[in-house]
Image (tube, rainbow, N blue to C red):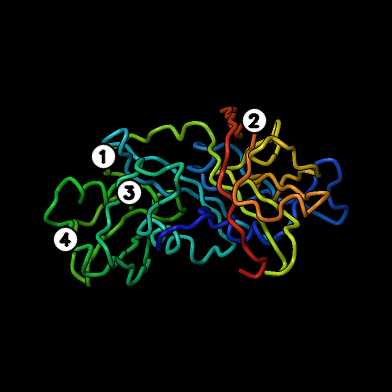
Amino acid sequence: MRFQVIVVIALLALSGLPGCRRSEPPPAAKPARVSATGAFERAFGPAPTTDKGTCFAFIIYFPSVKNPGKMTPFPFFSFDEASLKKVALQRMIGGIDEASYRGEFLHLFPSGSRLLSLSEEKGVVTVNFSKEVGQLALDPTRSELLQSSVALTLGQFPGVSRVRILSEGKDLLPELALKDQPTTPVAEPGAPRLLGVVAMKESAKEPIKEVDALFDRPVEIKEFQFSSDDGKVIAGDVFHTMFDMAAVLKPKDPEALKNLTSLRVRYRVVDKLGRPASGEGSVALTVRLHQD
């Protein structure tokens, strides 16, 4: 499955949830820390909080194009603990097609690749991919990267000790004991990135009442401003949403956003490990309905 504007699983829910205003947190909220894997915390720092139920933060490792032989961690969130491993592999197959990351991750999986099944017994996770993935057996380099990507991703979850990779029920690679896995270098995630800007509407006929600027990870927003391309600032309150992954504008005058196809954004943020990012420029405005 190719990603569209909203990459991270959390953001699929994010766009339909109200933001939590920094200066006036909802009085009924009872935040609890998101349950994060050790891999997530090493790459992106302490997990954020949420008042929307139990949530899980984890990492998917993608082969780096800029740093050949290294894996780059990318953060994901899910509310379904039972399906974390399955979701991680399905998203791994889909890859990342966001403009801000385009060309940075090697897409290992041939067109049409699917995850047929995933099972776990006594610490051994057996992954069965469709026949398309079997083509990787002819390419030792990609086979090795596939094994590293799958092993690193699954190995962050408690209780996983071995990984077996199949294609159509047949062994694609030798079963791997994670303790025996050669240390695969992991690239630094780098600075936070703005993924895109999404305008939210209740219905096609309603005016835009919310604009979400989506980041690739939890961040602390130091400064954020929306304006039209001609430089006119869009007045309104800016909120910080669940998972700390978006700046949300509630415009005072929704008509100011009517017929706009892009917005100019200026931001200054820092992630949970102190990596700063700033930027200013015009960003395409994608319009979505809350029920999408």
Answer with mark 1 or mark 2, whichever residue precedes in sequence: 1
Disc 1 designates what residue? 182
Answer with mark 3 or mark 2, whichever residue precedes in sequence: 3
- Whether 114 is drawn above or below 225: the answer is below
Q: Secondary structure at mark 3?
A: helix
Q: Can you tell which of label 1 and label 3 is closer to the viewer?
A: 3
Q: Can you tell which of label 3 and label 4 is closer to the viewer?
A: 4
Residue 65 left/right relative to 58:
left
Mark 3–mark 2 Cα distance, whole angstroms, equals: 32 Å
Residue 116 is situated, as x and y percent measured from the top left of the image, at 32, 72
Answer with mark 4 or mark 2, whichever residue precedes in sequence: 4
- Whether 22 is drawn above or below 96: the answer is above
In the picture, the disc for residue 268 is 2
Residue 113: name its quadrant.
bottom left
Disc 3 designates what residue? 149
Q: Are marks 4 and 1 in contact (CB under 8 Å)?
A: no
Query: Callout 1: 10 Å neighbours few (<14), some, many (20+)?
Result: few
- Of residues 283 and 96, the one nearer the viewer is 283
Q: Amino acid at mark 2?
A: Arg
In the picture, the disc for residue 135 is 4
Measuring 31% from the left and 64% from the top, which residue is drawn there? Answer: 127
Measuring 45% from the left and 57% from the top, which residue is drawn there? Answer: 3
